[in-house]
Image (tube, helix red, strand yellow):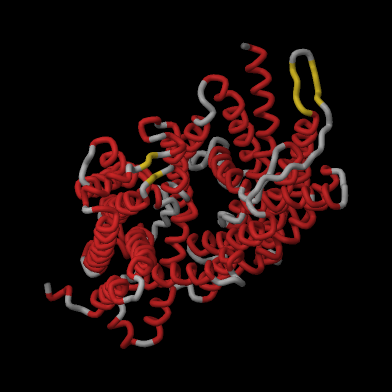
């Protein structure tokens, strides 16, 4: 029993880090501009298919492909910001919810027309890692390490570089930041781009370990909602913690009850946290 | 009664009635009826959601949860208890209303984006729960035995009966929606939409008003769910709790104009008509979602008040006619 528990827990934590990475994209955008990006899921799906295409057509190593896809994701995010978000940035929440959802529809529409909704697979393996009784696929461990590395880079960017400090300043108080001479529109676009990049990177990493389809992003988007609420909306480190918690739940619950109960527990937890502690587990007390 | 004989109410009612009798006059009543059913159902659902979304300003993203639980409750009563459709439909509405009341007490404390997220969470939690409930058929759902329609004079008769039931529901929703809009209660809701704290200071008992608005906007989708799934012949979690559908209702409201009586009726009809046209056109068949997305984006960015809102802003004469 102990061995099963340990293996399931580690398995859950490994995938949880990647969930956390995706959720960080969502929470960063919310923290900086109070916009819930409903195109989050399709962006994750784009990451999956970007890696799939680079791997099957150009024969690139999936982990190199993830870097390329991430760069494209940054650019795409900036484009989405200027097309869909910039005009409604100060409007009531419904406007930005709907404008990002329309981007969702457009991406899913094009994606479905191109790839249908059938399942694809990145046929790539890094063998199996064995330590004592513990076994895990190498690709899964590598993907989690890349996700951790990306998180570290995000923190370096936010805390050690000038544009990163601008992003935090705009998140903190946009008007004051503008008075200090920060070009807020460009910084908002950059933040949206980074948020999209994180989602797309997470999608690319998922493609290396699990089968993909164009609608799969939707379920990861819902997981991201749960995670950001767990960790506190707008708190990237909280998102990582939330991802780990969600991963643990997904790893451990099936040991005790039917897998179909996992989403029930996740969403009930989600609603409860919203009601009892809307600032999230890591958020400050009001 | 005098309050009811106004263009603000008569125009949307006339639209529904003209659409409702169209199948009787058309050459192929059965296929026209199917098309009109979808349009009228969308009008009714959009108008119900408009009560909480348009009037009160609370973005209920997962509103389809009430359509789903109502549908499930009614379907269960019909197949397991052998109920007639009429009490079953009322049961569906009642279950939806009770759930909305209980949830509303808790969730309506959240504002803005937090409320929208919570409604998505509730929808997904309910869907995941129903998948696990074996007495509701679990992941495959429930089916209606074909002989069930005999009770109502055969399948043909039943389809017409359900069609007129849907027309009745659409009319009912529009009348209720109009009465709310022109009442003191509705004024309170709109005050909450504009500034909740100010509304509270001015004497609107906001928790009570919000909860009632939520219950009213949930009861009709509950009843409509029973009618829809009875006509459908089966119910399953994926079709009863699909987030995408409830976002479509929001699109309909935005297209017509949020917070107006006529807007959701116009938007619901127009959206479904456009969708059907796109689906059957050879060029856009594969890209109907893209076209709908671009349309939504253009509305949100450039005409955020919707068609009716835009017309109302044009002239004072139109403001008197369109409510």
Look at the picture and state if A205 lies above or below A50. Answer: above
Name the residue nearer the viewer: A239 or B157. B157
Q: Is A165 left, or right, of B166 in this rendering?
A: right
x then y, percent, for residue B248: 46, 60
x then y, percent, for residue B222: 31, 50
From this viewpoint, which residue is outermost toward the top?
A: A1
Q: Is B167 left, or right, of A95 in this rendering?
A: left
x then y, percent, for residue A68: 82, 52
Q: Residue at x 32, y 82 (%)?
A: B319
Q: Quadrant of residue B13?
A: bottom left
Location of the N terminus of chain B by quadrant is bottom left
From this viewpoint, which residue is outermost toward the left?
A: B1
Residue B213 seen: no
Look at the picture and state if A110 lies above or below B125. Answer: below
x then y, percent, for residue B258: 39, 68
Location of the C terminus of chain B by quadrant is bottom left
Q: Quadrant of residue B131?
A: top left
Name the residue nearer the viewer: A174 or B136. B136
Q: Residue at x 60, y 31 (%)?
A: A245
Q: Quadrant of residue B256?
A: bottom left
Residue A13 seen: yes
Q: Residue at x 75, y 57 (%)?
A: A74
Q: Is B154 left, or right, of A93 in this rendering?
A: left
Q: Residue at x 80, y 29 (%)?
A: A138
């Amino acid at each position: 029993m102990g061995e099963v528990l340990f293996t399931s827990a580690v398995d859950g934590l490994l995938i949880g880090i990647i969930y956390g990475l995706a959720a960080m994209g969502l929470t960063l955008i919310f923290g900086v501009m109070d916009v819930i990006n409903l195109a989050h899921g399709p962006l994750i799906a784009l990451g999956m298919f970007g890696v799939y295409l680079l791997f099957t057509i150009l024969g690139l190593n999936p982990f190199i492909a993830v870097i390329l896809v991430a760069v494209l994701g940054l650019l795409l995010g900036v484009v989405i910001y200027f097309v869909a978000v910039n005009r409604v940035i100060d409007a009531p929440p419904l406007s930005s919810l709907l404008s990002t959802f329309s981007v969702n529809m457009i991406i899913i529409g094009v994606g479905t027309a191109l790839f249908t909704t059938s399942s694809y697979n990145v046929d790539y393996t890094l063998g199996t890692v064995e330590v004592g009784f513990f076994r895990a696929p190498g690709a899964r461990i590598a993907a989690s390490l890349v996700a951790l590395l990306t998180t570290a880079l995000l923190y370096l960017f936010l805390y050690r570089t000038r544009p990163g400090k601008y992003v935090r300043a705009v998140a903190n108080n946009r008007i004051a930041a503008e008075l200090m001479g920060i070009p807020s529109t460009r910084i908002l676009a950059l933040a949206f781009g980074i948020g999209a990049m994180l989602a797309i990177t997470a999608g690319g990493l998922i493609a290396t370990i699990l089968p993909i389809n164009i609608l799969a992003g939707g379920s990861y988007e819902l997981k991201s909602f749960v995670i950001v609420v767990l960790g506190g909306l707008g708190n990237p480190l909280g998102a990582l913690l939330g991802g780990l918690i969600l991963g643990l739940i997904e790893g451990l619950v099936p040991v005790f009850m039917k897998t179909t109960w996992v989403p029930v527990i996740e969403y009930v937890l989600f609603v409860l946290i919203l009601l009892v502690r809307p600032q999230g587990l890591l958020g400050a007390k009001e | 009664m005098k309050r009811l004989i106004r263009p603000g109410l008569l125009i949307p009612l006339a639209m529904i009635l003209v659409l409702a009798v169209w199948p009787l006059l058309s050459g192929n009543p059965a296929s026209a009826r199917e098309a009109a059913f979808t349009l009228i159902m969308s009008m009714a659902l959009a108008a119900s959601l408009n009560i909480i979304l348009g009037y009160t300003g609370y973005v209920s993203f997962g509103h389809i949860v009430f359509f789903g639980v109502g549908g499930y409750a009614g379907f269960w009563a019909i197949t397991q208890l052998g109920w007639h459709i009429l009490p079953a439909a009322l049961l569906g509405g009642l279950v939806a209303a009770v759930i909305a009341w209980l949830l509303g007490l808790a969730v309506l404390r959240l504002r803005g984006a937090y409320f929208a997220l919570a409604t998505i969470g509730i929808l997904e939690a309910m869907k995941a729960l129903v998948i696990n409930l074996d007495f509701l058929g679990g992941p495959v759902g429930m089916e209606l035995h074909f002989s069930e329609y005999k009770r109502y004079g055969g399948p043909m008769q039943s389809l017409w009966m359900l069609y007129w039931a849907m027309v009745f529901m659409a009319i009912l929703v529009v009348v209720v929606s109009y009465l709310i809009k022109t009442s003191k209660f509705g004024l309170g809701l709109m005050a909450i939409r504009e500034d909740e704290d100010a509304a509270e200071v001015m004497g609107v008992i906001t928790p009570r008003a919000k909860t009632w608005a939520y219950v009213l906007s949930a009861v009709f989708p509950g009843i409509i769910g029973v009618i829809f799934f009875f006509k459908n012949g089966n119910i399953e979690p994926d079709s009863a709790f699909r987030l995408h559908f409830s976002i479509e209702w929001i699109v309909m409201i935005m297209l017509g104009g949020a917070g107006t009586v006529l807007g959701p009726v116009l938007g619901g009809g127009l959206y479904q008509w456009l969708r059907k046209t796109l689906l059957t056109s050879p060029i856009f068949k594969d890209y109907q979602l893209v076209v709908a997305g671009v349309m939504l984006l253009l509305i949100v960015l450039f005409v955020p008040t919707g068609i009716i809102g835009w017309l109302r802003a044009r002239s004072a004469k139109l403001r008197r006619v369109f409510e």
